[in-house]
Image (cartoon, rainbow, N blue to C red):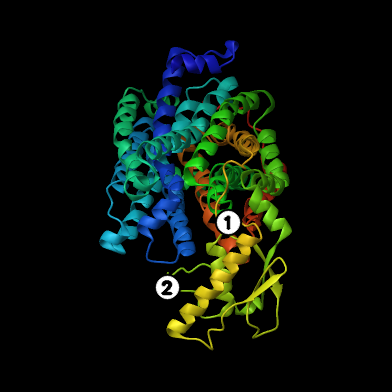
C-alpha cells in the first residue's frame, strides 16, 4: 500500500515515512467505516423485503430508503458529539471510538431477525442500528480529514487529503465486491434468503484489522503542541457556532460547497444504482457490477482533482463540478436509460403511458403508515399498479368525479370504480384491470426486465463513469477546503458539522426524496430536479461568498 501511495504521487511530491503511515492508516480505517455504512444502501431492495414486508412494495422500498437515510439524519449530531471530543481530547482516540461503534452496529445487522420472525420489532431495531452508525460516521470523517491535513505540508494538503476522499468510494467498491462475490458464490435465491447477511458479518474481520492499524498512530503534532501549551478550546461547540465570526463560515461552507458536493455524490453513486435497478429494471447483480466498474475507472480522479486543487484552488473545481451536474443530469440519465434498457426507452417513446384523472382525487403513492392498499379511489388503483410496475407515466387532467383511465399508446383502459364494487368483487375487478393493462404494456414493448443481451454495456459504463467523475471533482478537494476554513482549536467540530449536515441531510435524504417525487408524479426523471436545484444554489452561493483557501497556513 505504501508503494501504491508513492506511485500515485508525482515524484516531486513523495511523502515522508510518517506521512505515508498517517495517510495509509487513516484511509484504511475510513474505508472500513464507509464499507459498513453503504452495505445497507447496496442491499436496500433486499432489506425492504426482509424488514418492511408488512406494507405494499412501493412503500416498503421507500421505507427502506428512509431507514437508510436515518443514518444520515443523525450524522450532524455525531459531528457535534465526537467533534467536541476530538477538539478536547484528541483526533486519534476519538476516531477509534467511532470505528468501534460502527463495526459493532454493522455486525449486529447481520444477525438481526427479519419482519417475518419478530414483526414490527425488526424494522425498529434496524433503524436504531442505523442511527448508531450515523452517529459514529458523524465523528469519523472530520477526525480522519483533520488528522491527515494536520500532518500535511501546506502545498500538498489537497493531494494528501484526497486519499481520505477516495475512502467513501473505495468503501462502496469493497462492499460491492463482497456483495457480488457472495451473490455469485451462493446464487441469487440463497442470497436473497440469507446470503445478504454475509457482507455484514464479514465486517467483524475488517474491524479488527482497522482498529489494530489505527492504534499504531500518534496524535496529530499540531493538536499535541496546542494541548501541551494549554491553548486548545475548552468549549469548541460554543466557540465554533456560538459567535457569528466562526458560525458564518460554517454556513458558507454548507451552502457554498458541501450541499452541492453532497447531492452530486449521492446522485452519481447511489441514485444511479437505484435508478438502474428500480426504474430501468436491471437485475441487482448486474447493477452492482456496472457501478463497480465505473467506480474502478473513476476513483483515481479523486487524487487528481485533490492534486489539481493545490495548483489552481479548491473553489473553482468544486463549483465547476456542481455546474456540470446541474446542466447535464437530465441528458445523462436519459442516455443511461436508452443504453441500459433500449426496449423500455423505445416503448416509452412509441407508446407513452398517461393517466387521465382529476389529480385532486389522487393519493401520493407513498404511505407513511403502511396500511393504505390504494384501492379506495380509481385513481389510486391505476397509479399504484403503474408505480409497482416501474412504468413512467404522465398525468392528463379530467373532470372532477371522473373515473381514472390508463392510456397505453392509443389503447385506453378504465379503472374499476370502488364506489360500485366491494369485497371480493372489487378485488376481482382490480385484478382484471391490472391484467388488461399489463397485457397492453407487453404488446407495446414494455419489458418485464432489462435484456442484458440488448444492453449497450460500454455506453452504460461510460455514463456511470461520467457521473463518478463529477463526484471526484466536487469531493476530491472538499476536505482540504473545509480544514482550511477553520482554526486548529475548533477545526474538528467546526468542519464536521457543515460536512455532515450537507452529506447527511442534503445528500443522505436524496434517494428517499427523489423516489418519493417519482412516485408522486409518475415521471422516472422527476427526482433529478432535487440535485439539480441544490447544485444550482451551491454554485450561486459559492461564487458570491466562498473564499479560496488553498494557500492558507493551518498550523495555528
489 displayed left or right of 217: right
Closer to the chain start, of discs 1 and 2, is: 2
Kind of element beneath mark 2? loop
Residue depicted at x 70% and y 53%? 346
**x, y percent for residue 477:** 59, 32
* Dot 1 crowding, Cα within 10 Å, few <14, some 14–19, many 20+: many
Q: Residue furthest top?
A: 11
Q: Is residue 396 above or below residue 133?
A: below
459 displayed left or right of 56: right
**x, y percent for residue 474:** 62, 37
To which residue does mark 2 refer?
Answer: 371
To which residue does mark 1 refer?
Answer: 514
* Dot 2 crowding, Cα within 10 Å, few <14, some 14–19, many 20+: few
Kind of element beneath mark 1? helix
**x, y percent for residue 320:** 70, 37
**x, y percent for residue 344:** 64, 53
Q: Is residue 363 above or below residue 544?
A: below
Amino acid at each position: 500500500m505504501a508503494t501504491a501511495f508513492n506511485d500515485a504521487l508525482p515524484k516531486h511530491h513523495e511523502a515522508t515515512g510518517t506521512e505515508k503511515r498517517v495517510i495509509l492508516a487513516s484511509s484504511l480505517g475510513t474505508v472500513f467505516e464507509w464499507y459498513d455504512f453503504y452495505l445497507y444502501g447496496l442491499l436496500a431492495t433486499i432489506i425492504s423485503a426482509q424488514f418492511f414486508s408488512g406494507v405494499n412494495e412501493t412503500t416498503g422500498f421507500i421505507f427502506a430508503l428512509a431507514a437508510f437515510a436515518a443514518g444520515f439524519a443523525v450524522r450532524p449530531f455525531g459531528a457535534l458529539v465526537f467533534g467536541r471530543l476530538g477538539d478536547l481530547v484528541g483526533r486519534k482516540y476519538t476516531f477509534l471510538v467511532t470505528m468501534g461503534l460502527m463495526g459493532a452496529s454493522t455486525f449486529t445487522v447481520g444477525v438481526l431477525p427479519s419482519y417475518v420472525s419478530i414483526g414490527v420489532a425488526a424494522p425498529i431495531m434496524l433503524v436504531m442500528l442505523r442511527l448508531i452508525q450515523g452517529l459514529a460516521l458523524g465523528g469519523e470523517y472530520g477526525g480522519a480529514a483533520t488528522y491527515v491535513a494536520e500532518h500535511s505540508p501546506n502545498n500538498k494538503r489537497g493531494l494528501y487529503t484526497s486519499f481520505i476522499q477516495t475512502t467513501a468510494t473505495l468503501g462502496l467498491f469493497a462492499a460491492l465486491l463482497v456483495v457480488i462475490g457472495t451473490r455469485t458464490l451462493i446464487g441469487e435465491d440463497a442470497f436473497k434468503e440469507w446470503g445478504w447477511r454475509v457482507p455484514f458479518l464479514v465486517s467483524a474481520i475488517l474491524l479488527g484489522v482497522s482498529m489494530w492499524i489505527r492504534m499504531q498512530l500518534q496524535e496529530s503534532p499540531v493538536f499535541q503542541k496546542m494541548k501541551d501549551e494549554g491553548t486548545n478550546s475548552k468549549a469548541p461547540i460554543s466557540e465554533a457556532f456560538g459567535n457569528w465570526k466562526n458560525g458564518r463560515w460554517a454556513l458558507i461552507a454548507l451552502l457554498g460547497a458541501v450541499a452541492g458536493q453532497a447531492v452530486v455524490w449521492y446522485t452519481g453513486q447511489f441514485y444511479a444504482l437505484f435508478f438502474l435497478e428500480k426504474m430501468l429494471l436491471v437485475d441487482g447483480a448486474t447493477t452492482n457490477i456496472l457501478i463497480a466498474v465505473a467506480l474502478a475507472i473513476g476513483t483515481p480522479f479523486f487524487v487528481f482533482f485533490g492534486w489539481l486543487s493545490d495548483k489552481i484552488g479548491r473553489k473553482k473545481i468544486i463549483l465547476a463540478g456542481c455546474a456540470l451536474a446541474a446542466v447535464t443530469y437530465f441528458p445523462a440519465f436519459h442516455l443511461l436509460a436508452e443504453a441500459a434498457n433500449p426496449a423500455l426507452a423505445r416503448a416509452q417513446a412509441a407508446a407513452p403511458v398517461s393517466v387521465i384523472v382529476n389529480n385532486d382525487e389522487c393519493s401520493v403513492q407513498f404511505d407513511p403508515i403502511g396500511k393504505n392498499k390504494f384501492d379506495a379511489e380509481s385513481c389510486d388503483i391505476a397509479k399504484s399498479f403503474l408505480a409497482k410496475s416501474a412504468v413512467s407515466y404522465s398525468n392528463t387532467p379530467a373532470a372532477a368525479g371522473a373515473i381514472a383511465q390508463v392510456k397505453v399508446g392509443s389503447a385506453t383502459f378504465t379503472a374499476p370504480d370502488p364506489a360500485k364494487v366491494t369485497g371480493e368483487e372489487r378485488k376481482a375487478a382490480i385484478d382484471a384491470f391490472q391484467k388488461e393493462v399489463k397485457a397492453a404494456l407487453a404488446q407495446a414493448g414494455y419489458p418485464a426486465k432489462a435484456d442484458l443481451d440488448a444492453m449497450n454495456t460500454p455506453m452504460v459504463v461510460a455514463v456511470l463513469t461520467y457521473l463518478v467523475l463529477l463526484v471526484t471533482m466536487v469531493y476530491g478537494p472538499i476536505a482540504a477546503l473545509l480544514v482550511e476554513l477553520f482554526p486548529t482549536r475548533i477545526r474538528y467540530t467546526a468542519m464536521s458539522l457543515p460536512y455532515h449536515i450537507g452529506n447527511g441531510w442534503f445528500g443522505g435524504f436524496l434517494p428517499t426524496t427523489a423516489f418519493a417525487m417519482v412516485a408522486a408524479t409518475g415521471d422516472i426523471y422527476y427526482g433529478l430536479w432535487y440535485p439539480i436545484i441544490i447544485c444550482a444554489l451551491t454554485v450561486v452561493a459559492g461564487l458570491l461568498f466562498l473564499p479560496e483557501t488553498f494557500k492558507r497556513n493551518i498550523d495555528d
